[in-house]
Image (cartoon, rainbow, N blue to C red):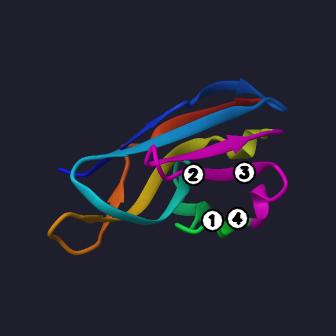
Amino acid sequence: QVQLVESGGGLVQAGGSLRLSCAASGSIFRIGCMGWYRQAPGKQRDLVATIAAVGNTNYADSVKGRFTIARDNAKRTVYLQMNSLEPEDTAVYYCNALIQPFGALDRDVWGQGTQVTVSS
């Protein structure tokens, strides 16, 4: 069973920082692109940032210059450092990864989500 487990969400004041982590576990042969998405109440799930296996990154315009995505391939973990948080960043944050289990094809895996709340 391949899964992603997120941690690090919480409540923070505007201008503050949080760091999210997401660790992959299970019988994993390879992990491709990893990323973070977020979904605010009543809205669709949107891309926040992605990072390829070789380190190329991509960010939503709304978080450029404030958020940084990184990964540790040895630990099978992806991180999202969020600085200068704004109330508009309030959402459930989901980790996503393209994972190939041993003896199986690639599959798109999602974490359970972690709540980030930014107070004004």
The residue singled out by tag 2 in the image is 71
Badge 1 local density, few (<14 within 10 Å), some, or many (20+)? some
Residue drawn at 57 percent across, 51 percent down = 71
Where's the C terminus, which quadrant? top right
| Amino acid type shown at disc 4 | Tyr
The image quarter containing residue 19 is: top right
Which amino acid, mark 2?
Answer: Arg
Mark 2 and mark 4 in contact? Answer it, CB < 8 Å: no
Circles 3 and 1, Cβ within 8 Å, touching? The answer is: no
Q: Secondary structure at mark 1?
A: loop
Is the Cβ of the residue at disc 1 closer than 8 Å to that at disc 2? yes
State the mark number for residue 38.
none
Residue 63 appears at what percent x and percent y?
A: 76, 56
The residue positioned 69% from the left and 42% from the top of the image is 81
Numbered tag placed on residue 68 in the rendering: 3
Q: Which residue is mark 1?
A: 55
Q: Secondary structure at mark 2?
A: strand
Highlighted magenta segment, given as a residue range: 61-84
Residue 72's spot in the image, x, y percent? 54, 48
> Is residue 88 highlighted in magenta?
no
Give the labeled residue for mark 4: 59
Name the residue nearer the viewer: 39 or 18: 18
Q: Residue at x 46, y 48 (%)?
A: 74
Residue 6, how many percent across, how many down?
44, 38
User: Three-letter amino acid code at disc 1?
Assistant: Gly
- Amino acid type assigned to the residue bearing label 3 in the image: Thr
Q: Does the magenta-highlighted stretch encompass residue 67?
A: yes
- Disc tally is 4
